[in-house]
Amino acid sequence: MVNLITPALFKKYRTAEQFANAGTAELEAMIHSSGFFRNKAKSIKAASRIIADEYGGKVPATMEELLILPGVARKTANVVLGVAFGKAEGIVVDTHVQRLSRRLDFSKEERPDKIEDDLMKLFPRNKWILLAHLLIHHGRAKCSALRPKCAQCPIEDLCYAEDKTV
Ligand code: SF4
């Protein structure tokens, strides 16, 4: 959904300053279909204000600075650092990475920060960015939450998850 929303959004608002000055109702309408649109609009405007005023309109490139921005926690900061800056400071743990880490026995933890710690110990740093992309892609394509497509899974022989469907 985010990928569907962003082309029009980035066409309309081209700088952090423009996002910070966006009309709240207009911004909310543009991101409505992504859910939690009121909170998101508030965070986008507040984060953009900081980026415009304190970072000259450029998104900061460190974990410490990103975590200060409204609406940004470790998952988002890891996405920005990895995808935009090619920096592996940590590993993105979203709902797919969380589920697959348990199914593939990478971690027995529930909390994303603990799962991230386990993954960082298990995998070399130069694989951290790719690992999250692979797990998210596999989670979307095959290893869904309710009914994983295990018969079509290329790593089925390596997996002994309790909720396998074959
Ligand atoms: S075998 Fe099934 S549960 Fe295991 S990784 Fe593949 S799709 Fe997921």
Image (cartoon, rainbow, N blue to C red):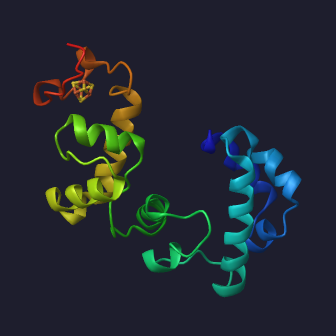
Looking at the rendered image, the quarter that the N terminus falls into is top right
* Rendering quarter of residue 85: bottom left
* Rendering quarter of residue 69: bottom right
Q: Is residue 17 left or right of residue 148?
A: right
Is the residue 143 above or below the residue 125 in the image? above
Looking at the rendered image, the quarter that the C terminus falls into is top left
User: Measuring 15% from the left and 29% from the top, which residue is drawn there?
Assistant: 159
Is the residue 49 above or below the residue 123 in the image? below
Q: Is residue 44 left or right of residue 80?
A: right
Q: Is residue 63 left or right of residue 124?
A: right
* Rendering quarter of residue 108: top left
User: Measuring 34% from the left and 44% from the top, which residue is drawn there?
Assistant: 97
User: Measuring 32% from the left and 38% from the top, which residue is drawn there?
Assistant: 99
Is the residue 153 above or below the residue 83 in the image? above
Is the residue 27 above or below the residue 96 in the image? below
User: Measuring 15% from the left and 56% from the top, which residue is drawn there?
Assistant: 122
x then y, percent, for residue 161: 18, 28
x then y, percent, for residue 33: 71, 38
x then y, percent, for residue 142: 34, 25
x then y, percent, for residue 140: 41, 32
Judged from the image, the quadrant occupied by ligand 1 is top left
Q: Is residue 11 left or right of residue 34?
A: right
